[in-house]
Amino acid sequence: MFASAATAPSSAAGFNAEFAKAVADGLTLKRQKTLPPSWLYDEVGSALFEVITVLPEYGVTRAEAALLDRAAGEIIRASGRPAHIVELGSGTGTKTRHILKAAAHHHTVQYAPIDISAAALANCVHALGDVMNLSIEPIAATYLEGIDTAVAARKPGESILLLFLGSTIGNFTRTEAASFLRQLSKRMQPGDYLLLGADLVKSRARLISAYDDPIGVTAAFNLNLLARINRELEGHFDMSLFTHEARYNERYSRIEMHLRSRVDQQVSIEALDLTVPFRKDETIWTESSHKFRAEELPCVGRRSGWACVRQWVDGEWGFAETLFRKSK
Ligand code: AVI
């Protein structure tokens, strides 16, 4: 299951057994080769993702930041002025800053960003260090383990506002998303809130150029996965023999990112003692990015133990922040 946009720290020299297993499993599948999207985010991939977020064609991050800037005060009031804010994924702090500043306007707020990458957490602490009345307590863990730690640290009577921003929920399948939201709900108490950022369905043309930008940053982000296999697992992928492809799957309202082999070829991965055959035009499916209808999001939450309180929509790009309260 996808964890976060910076969850898979690269180890320049080290051998990551989980990565090795994911590559061996995904590239030996008979029908559709796949690689899980969390492995896109090593040091190079995370840096490329930061560039993606400022591309003119990729409106997701800008739309969410603008929405949070406009609605932060309302979100904080509607969530009962929480003293404890927990964020899944630490990001760069840019979007969260609006929420934290609004929350810490009247009283001290405890902010716990959760990320498996210590480097991402350090950046976040650095970026938000100047927000007044904010006590930052980073948690280096997977999302669910991190929530357990954050919940254990809550003071009696204190409610938590959980942030899951950036449309990372879209990188789960719909079934995984529902089960993940249910897992979150199970760990929360009545009176706790969840703010969920999700990208909305828009025209195919807009989506394709967001995920296949004209200067090739997203292509580099995707191809870096093969470069990572070369770096970490002694792979022999020739990047010029693969092309990045973004497809829009109308039926599931999702972008699917693939790496397409230009030729029939065999690629050896020495650390796995594996040779992977590719037919011309065969692809590796590396990521899905689901898009939602605004009215679908309250239903997604309701089925997973969350009651919708309010929704804010950015109509220009098409992005929604939905605030949920844990159902009893
Ligand atoms: C992190 N995640 C929400 C991004 C998305 O839009 O699905 C990842 C991404 N992949 C390509 N461009 C951006």
Image (spheres, helix red, strand yellow):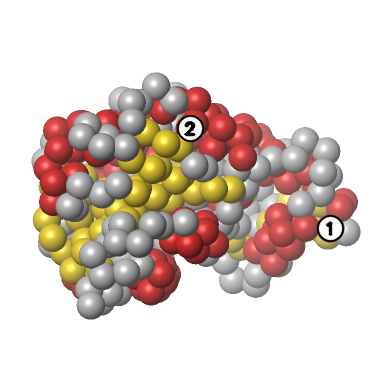
Q: Nearer the viewer, mark 1 or mark 2?
A: 2
Q: Position of residue 17 (x, y in %)?
A: 77, 58
Q: Residue furthest front?
A: 156
Residue at disc 1, CB closer than 8 Å to ligand 1: no
Dot 1: within a 10 Å radius of its alpha carbon, few (fewer than 14), some, or many (20 or more) residues?
some
Q: Secondary structure at mark 1?
A: helix
Q: How far apart in space, not on screen, are marks 1 and 2 (Cα)?
A: 35 Å
Q: How many C-alpha atoms fall within 10 Å of the one at disc 2: few (<14), some, or many (≥20)?
A: many
Badge 1 is on which residue? 272
Instruction: Provide the residue designation for mark 2.
Output: 124
Q: Quadrant of residue 284?
A: bottom right
Q: What's the amino acid at mark 2?
A: Cys
Task: Judge whether residue 65 can be spotted in this image.
Answer: no
In the foreground, 257 or 78: 78
Going 41% across and 69% down the picture, which residue do you hit?
Answer: 187
Q: Are marks 1 and 2 in contact (CB under 8 Å)?
A: no
Q: Going 20% across and 34% down the picture, which residue do you hit?
A: 106
- In the image, 166 versus 288, the foreground residue is 166
The residue at the point 53 percent across, 29 percent down is: 123
In the picture, the disc for residue 289 is none
Taking 70 as reference, is 142 above or below it? below
- Residue 245 in percent (x, y) is at 47, 45
Label 2, secondary structure: give it.
Answer: helix
Residue 50 is left or right of residue 140, and the answer is left
* Direction from residue 195 to residue 242 in the image, left or right: right
> Please, which residue is most extreme toward the top here?
130
In the image, taking residue 205 as reference, residue 4 lies left or right, namely right
From the top left corner, tell me how far across and down residue 171 is, in percent: 42, 56
Position of the C terminus, as image quadrant, is bottom left
Q: Amino acid at mark 1?
A: Leu
Whether 80 is drawn above or below 181: the answer is: above
- Image: 71 above or below 165: above
